[in-house]
Image (cartoon, rainbow, N blue to C red):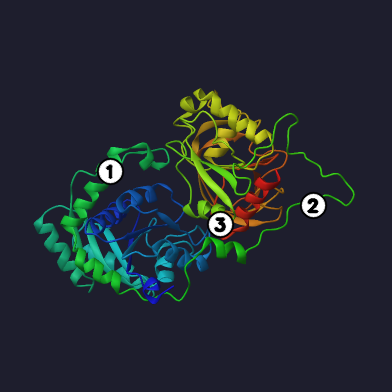
Amino acid sequence: MTSSDSAVPRLVIAAPSSGSGKTTVATGLMAALTARGLAVSPHKVGPDYIDPGYHALATGRVGRNLDAYLCGPELVGPLFLHGARGCDIAVVEGVMGLYDGAAGEGELASTAQVAKLLRAPVVLVVDASSQSRSVAALVHGFVSWDPEVRVGGVILNKVASDRHEVLLREAVDSVGVPVLGVLRRAAPVETPSRHLGLVPVAERGSDAVDAVAAMGARVADGCDLEALAGLARSAGALSCAAWDAGEALVSSPPPPLPVPSPGAAPPDPLVRPGRPRPQAPDGLRRRVAMASGAAFTFSYAEHTELLAAAGAEVVTFDPLRDEEVPEGTQGLVIGGGFPEVYAAELSANEGLRKSVAELAFSGAPVAAECAGLLYLCRELDGLPMCGVLDAAARMSKRLTLGYRDAVAVSDSALAVAGTRMRGHEFHRTAVEPGAGAAPAWGMRAPERRVEGFVERGVHASYLHTHWAAEPGVARRFVERCRTS
């Protein structure tokens, strides 16, 4: 890694609270800088999967998450440098309010903590719609709260008029923080929401392209792009090295696979009699199929990179369209998304449901998170699903949201019992029963309970995890592809 790699210009876009406009500003800034010919690296603080999709559309690069809770503070810098390698500038969108983090954990996982770890200046997006001189007190409070957080500028959002702008600028000038942009009050850019937030890019097609273009135009018209780029160049060099999937696997070997007792025939409880084992097309690399498309949009890019580094050929398939899993599939990853929105279409694709069930019953490793869990159930809101798990899923009025401290309860294709991982839950559905005879996880915090299913080669759970925190998960999964 060269010194220029470690000192890539970067900004953190933050706000006093959610709803202030930081997604519009961050995505718009990414689009505006990209339109100027810069290679822009997009990042999102926290576990959110949806905003990175808009970031990717704005920049043409994979949107990546920086989550100090899921991955640990020590990985924030390396993961950032990995994503920003070869880029001219990086834009990091914050989460919630600048100083809001994991509940009861101080600054952990907050935008402020990530900004400090990245030695990056912060641009504060302020909703100025109901204030004038008071904005000075608000900005002063955020600037002075933590001296280690460098607020390098303010973007005023929802400004009503020229007179309003003058009053706001005078107030902010008194704090000594430059105003780097002013966005007038206008009809919001069309970014529709539903029960779990913004509708993902994969579901919106050209509408999402138009929305990102509109954000880019607003930021280009209302913000000083040269001043913002200059502030980004003031970020200090990082002392860490960029994360690398192959190196991560070497430095974090997985626990060994279970070994049968001496003299005993190797038991094969994972394979249902009469069902053939899948074979890799080339006899060498293991083929891992990953669900994609509008119903399954949630996945961290590092998961694919770790699987590939562990020896897998990763291919994608769309459960809404494909009638079978890809030929030669030996392992299956079904991440998060919105199967509840597409339940009828998923149920109608009977061929794929049977193909997934046959693969799971053959003993092949299957990793299913949240949406994947629902898809593997017997039914979802009364509609038949894959039937791999003897459980029923339904929409719920209760939103389950938050970080979780978990430990693996049962040996599985992902981890041996006792492996500790941190994860995140985000769903408005419920599964009955909530855990199988061999649960996937025991939650240590904020509440103690068991959750999820380990059956045959299947590991299914509501918990979203980031495999960069425990790279051995990917290696173990690919090893199971070789032995199942």
**Cβ atoms under marks 2 and 3 closer than 8 Å:** no
Residue placed under numbered mark 1 in the picture: 209
Of label 2 and label 1, which has the lower sequence position? 1
In this rendering, position of residue 73 left or right of residue 42: right
Q: Residue at x 37, y 59 (%)?
A: 94
Residue 71 rendering spot, x and y as whole percentages: 53, 60
State the quadrant of the N terminus: bottom left
Q: In the image, what residue occupies the spot 46% across and 30% down?
A: 320
Does 189 appear above or below 178? above
Q: Secondary structure at mark 3?
A: helix
Q: Secondary structure at mark 2?
A: loop
Q: CA distance from mark 2 to mark 3?
A: 24 Å
Residue behind mark 3: 309
Examine the rendered structure and indicate whether residue 95 appears above or below residue 299: below
The answer to whether residue 466 is left or right of residue 131 is right
Q: Name the disc covering residue 259, or none.
A: 2
x, y percent for residue 249:
60, 61
Extreme-left residue of the structure: 163
Q: Does any portion of residue 388 appear in the rendered image?
A: no
Which of labels 2 and 1 is toward the front?
2
466 relative to 478 in the view: left or right: left
Is residue 292 something one can see in this rendering? yes
For the residues labelled 2 and 1, the Cα–Cα distance comes to 52 Å
Q: Amino acid at mark 1?
A: Val
Q: Quadrant of the C terminus?
A: top right
Mark 3: few/some/many CA within 10 Å (<14, 14-19, 20+): many
Q: Residue furthest front?
A: 282
> What label sits on residue 150 in the rendered view?
none
